[in-house]
Amino acid sequence: MKTEIYSHKFAQNQSVDDQSGLIRVLDGQSALPDYQRYKKRSLELLNLRPGMRCIDIGCGLGAEVHTMAEMVAPNGEAIGVDPSALFIGISEERKPKGNPARFLQADGSKLDFATASFEAARIDRVLQHTPQPSRFISEAHRMLKAGGRCVVVEPDWETFVINHPDRNNTRKIVNTWCDKYQNPWIGREISGLFKRAGFSDVLTEGVTLIYPTLEVFLRLFQFSDFARECLSDAEDWLAKLEGVGRAGEFFASVEMFMVVGKKVI
């Protein structure tokens, strides 16, 4: 039976059968220090203050929306939207007692909120999975008030690297991984999409995600299963990767880009 590769199911707009496995992977990613640092930085760039109204488009399991709600309390509002009923349910279940965050199941490319009704918008690792990323950024621009800020964080999968002695098969596997996404180059495209949507003062920061151990990498990327789908000699490739790990020389990373812009009118 073919194993589900969760990130690629998302990329192909397919439902995930093993929902508990998916949640474990997402929680595992969120626990990594590099992920926590970039998420904290993305919230800093929004310049949230009490009384502001903000939205997280494609909010996933909702942790950042919970934080945003605390940052804009007591008179502000933080809303998370996601097309997944599963994610919205978990976001509500995990909401700390008394936290005022709101969650709605919705398509982030066409939302029912009024024009100029938010001061801040955030999109995190969503556009790599959607066929029309410009719609999400244009929708965020529409909903923002003048002076409002938008932050988008996305990977550029062409920057995915793995330390391995077999260069040919490693190139094949990382290129195949990259091409499974609808928008594998979205990281390098975000700043241009911001400018096209009408944002000004567009700035970009690089974010390097380094996977700390081979065990974490294989678990969070489901990479053993993927290698077996991708390579006819996968067992040899995986054995060599294990050897790299035993020697203390394992390294894998991907570059993400964090873009912030401001709506001027």
Image (spheres, helix red, strand yellow):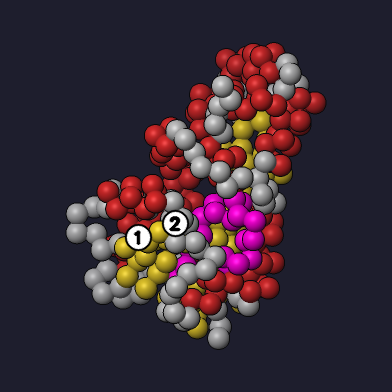
Q: Which residue extends farthest left?
A: 98
Mark 2 vs 1: CB contact within 8 A:
yes
Viewer-side residue, 43 vs 138: 138
User: Does residue 250 appear left or right of residue 97 in this picture?
Assistant: right
Viewer-side residue, 145 vs 48: 145
Crowding at mark 1 (Cα within 10 Å: few <14, some 14-19, many 20+) = many
Residue 222 versus residue 85 in the image, above or below = above
Task: Check residue 177 for magenta coloring.
Answer: no
Amino acid at dot 2: Asp
Q: Residue at x 37, y 61 (%)?
A: 104
User: Does residue 135 appear left or right of residue 33 in this picture?
Assistant: right
Q: Which mark is residue 174?
A: none
Number of numbered discs overlaid on the protein picture: 2
Crowding at mark 2 (Cα within 10 Å: few <14, some 14-19, many 20+) = many
> Looking at the rendering, in which quadrant would you find the C terminus?
bottom right
User: Does residue 224 appear left or right of residue 55 in this picture?
Assistant: right
Q: Position of residue 227 (x, y in %)?
A: 65, 24
For the question of whether residue 81 can be seen, the reply is yes
- Reading the image, the residue beneath label 1 is 103
- Reading the image, the residue beneath label 2 is 82
Give the structural element (helix, strand or loop) at label 2: strand
Stretch in magenta: 120-137
Q: Position of residue 32 (x, y in %)?
A: 45, 39
Residue 46 versus residue 2 in the image, above or below = below
Amino acid at dot 1: Phe
Q: Residue at x 76, y 25 (%)?
A: 169
Task: Check residue 124 for magenta coloring.
Answer: yes
Q: Which residue extends farthest right?
A: 168
Q: Residue at x 49, y 61 (%)?
A: 107
Q: Residue at x 61, y 51 (%)?
A: 128
